[in-house]
Image: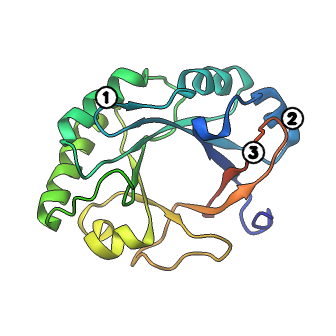
Amino acid sequence: WRPASSDFPVQGIDVSEAQGPLDWWRVKSAGGIRFAYARATTGADGRDRRFAANWRGLYHAGIPRGAIHVFSLCQLAADQAGNFVTRVPPAKDQLPVALELDFEPDCAARPAREVVIGELNLFLAAIESHFGQRAILKITQRFDAWYRVSDAIPRRLWSVQPFFPPAYFDKPWTIWQASRFRRIEGVAQPVNWDVIAR
């Protein structure tokens, strides 16, 4: 399943090492994919083992590409930004960096809201200065309910909710992750399927 193209003409995927090796030419030839995001880093030292191959593959296949950083509440923003900028080479064709915000299983910390917002702003200042464009915030409903990031930081928003268009932000979303179980040619495992608002 995927949302109707008549409702959302621009659709794509986001992937990580969990999908294993991808054949980006087959992905492109399968049709329907207009953009892709690849996870690059997690926290201050986590690096996706498939990122470099995905980044190259997307470029050679001519699919517009973006990189994702998964934020950790257990590590300093400056260290996380350093991890990301050393892993992701700036490219003229890249989409805005995506900052993924959720409660990760390896981090039980729940800092105060003002601390989290401050750290997120530090991370964003560092990467946006480096890449020369504003990031997009991929925020789950539970994370935004706890920290209200979408109210505090004015950025485009990427919502995460299977099957039904989300309504948990007080402002319009730009990207919607509509499914985590889409199967496509060129990928052995299911992928996250995303659409862009009109």
The reply, left or right, for residue 30 in relation to residue 104 is: right
Element marked by disc 1: helix
The C terminus is located in which quarter? bottom right
Mark number displayed over residue 29: 2
Which is nearer the N-term, disc 1 or disc 2?
2
For disc 1, the neighbor class at 10 Å (few under 14, some 14 to 19, many from 20) is many
Location of residue 16 by image quarter = top right
The N terminus is located in which quarter? bottom right
Pointer 1 residue: 83
The reply, left or right, for residue 24 in relation to residue 40 is: right
Which is nearer the N-term, disc 1 or disc 3?
3
Amino acid type of the residue tagged 3 in the rendering: Ile
The residue nearer to you, when weighing 185 against 96, is 185
From the viewer's perspective, is residue 12 above or below residue 162? above
Mark number displayed over residue 33: 3
Residue at 48% across / 23% down in the picture?
91
